[in-house]
Image (cartoon, helix red, strand yellow):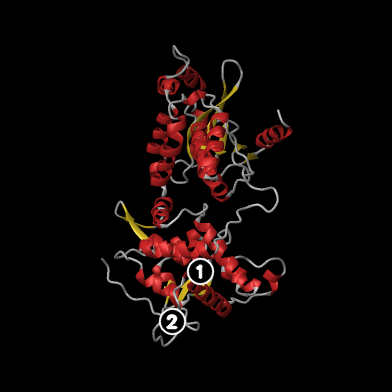
Amino acid sequence: MSEETSSSRRQKESRRQRLSDTWISRYRPTLPQEDWFDVSCTDLVLRISYGGTRTFRARFRDENGKTRYHSIGRWDPHKFNVDAARKAAKAFDPQMELKGRRSDKGLAEDQAWWLTATFEQVIEKYIAEVVTGFRTANETSRVYRRYVVPVLGKKLFLDLKQSDAAQLRVTMRKENGHRQADIVFGLIRTLLFWVEDEGLIDDYASPIRYQSKRRGKKKKGGGRERVLDDDELKLVWNAAALMGGLYGGLVQLLLLTAQRRQCLATAKWSEIEGDTWHIRDEGPSAKGTGEVLRLPPLALQILNSLPRIKDNPYVFGVVDDGEHKPFNSFSQRKDELLALLPRQLPRWTLHDLRRTARTRMEDIGIEETTGEVTIGHALPGVKRIYIRSKFKEKRADALLRLSQHIADVVGLGLPPDQGTPSGPVPSNVIPLARAKGS
């Protein structure tokens, strides 16, 4: 046993707390998985899992004196709170649990299925019971079925080893890139932790444990360095213009605003007043929120061209099962855009467009501090304390100059003082048209 593992177990055993609903709601875990032992009821344990799920478990000993745990329900302040969990833990009968564990094959009837279940069957069970409630349910299900099932689907779930998932990750790095390989590996790990946390199989422990450091990153420098050159920028811009729609507009606005993908994809029409985008404040833990950006005319023109759905509050809004949601079909739409390119480009991501825009700001002489605050980065060190400016005018000038630069690179031929297609324009403000609901 490594020193790190031993230390982790000692930390886990030392976590004792007089559990309360208030404490549970406010506590933020510091490790991927934590067990908290209730001081008031020594046999009650609160497990905070890898995904943030809070589950109560009753602790008992089997006939061999080994400590076991039985899941008694998920924490819910209204339906199953701490008081109810303490009553359930005290009423729990270990003998009934041990009797239920015994059968001809050593498993209870509800666990016998797992003896012959393939990894594909477990994936489908997880999708049906858990993933369907995700906002990204379609994309998550697609990734499981496209990348995991063809390689590991026929393997018995209980025979799955860490090396199986690791080998899939290595293969995917070569064929699909580091990012996609890490995503798939993480989804496999999440599924295995779900089986462990829910107690679906007695004594089951995920063969893949949490690893704090991402693989595939360089030790020095870290992160990606991909920036589109002039030719690539022109090809991507023209393909996005040809594609049009929500995704085409998203790609172009990512280049023109240099904002994070999720920040732009979840923007609401109510946040845009005239030529100004008031990025909503989502709290101190969220990145790049609460900013005010005056958008250049070219960005406003693209906003005006986006399709709109009646009563949908999102700029990039879609309807899913009758519900208004922000656009999230990034990978499928990107495949469609790639098909419009006249030639294949080295792999690039939507986040690379943000990096490209920030690099272009530096190249055209925008002051470093202005460039950083424009893309939503916090000022470093004491600057954050003493510089309290909102940089509203400097941000607006930076985005206007960036739009003029991009227009020049892609060949739009905009007037140098307007940043909008040729023609008489009385000011640099283009009011958003009130599109009629469809």
Closer to the camera, 361 or 33? Answer: 361
- In this rendering, the answer to whether 328 lies above or below 177 is below
From the image, tell me which residue sits under label 2.
429
Closer to the camera, 261 or 54? Answer: 261
Dot 1 or dot 2, earlier in sequence: 1
Disc 1 secondary structure class: helix
Q: Residue at x 67, y 75 (%)?
A: 387
Res 368 quadrant in image: bottom right
Res 322 quadrant in image: bottom left
Q: Amino acid at mark 1?
A: Thr
Q: Residue at x 62, y 70 (%)?
A: 362
Q: Position of residue 240 (x, y in %)?
A: 41, 62
Q: Amino acid at mark 2?
A: Val
Between the C-alphas of marks 1 and 2, the distance is 16 Å
From the image, tell me which residue sits under label 1.
257
Disc 2 packing (10 Å; few <14; some 14–19; many ≥20): some
- In this rendering, the answer to whether 222 lies above or below 110 is below
Q: Residue at x 40, y 41 (%)?
A: 141
Quadrant occupied by the N terminus: top right
Q: Which mark is residue 66?
A: none
As drawn, which residue projects farthest toward the front? Answer: 343
As drawn, which residue projects farthest toward the right? Answer: 3
Res 302 quadrant in image: bottom left
Q: Position of residue 267 (x, y in %)?
A: 44, 65
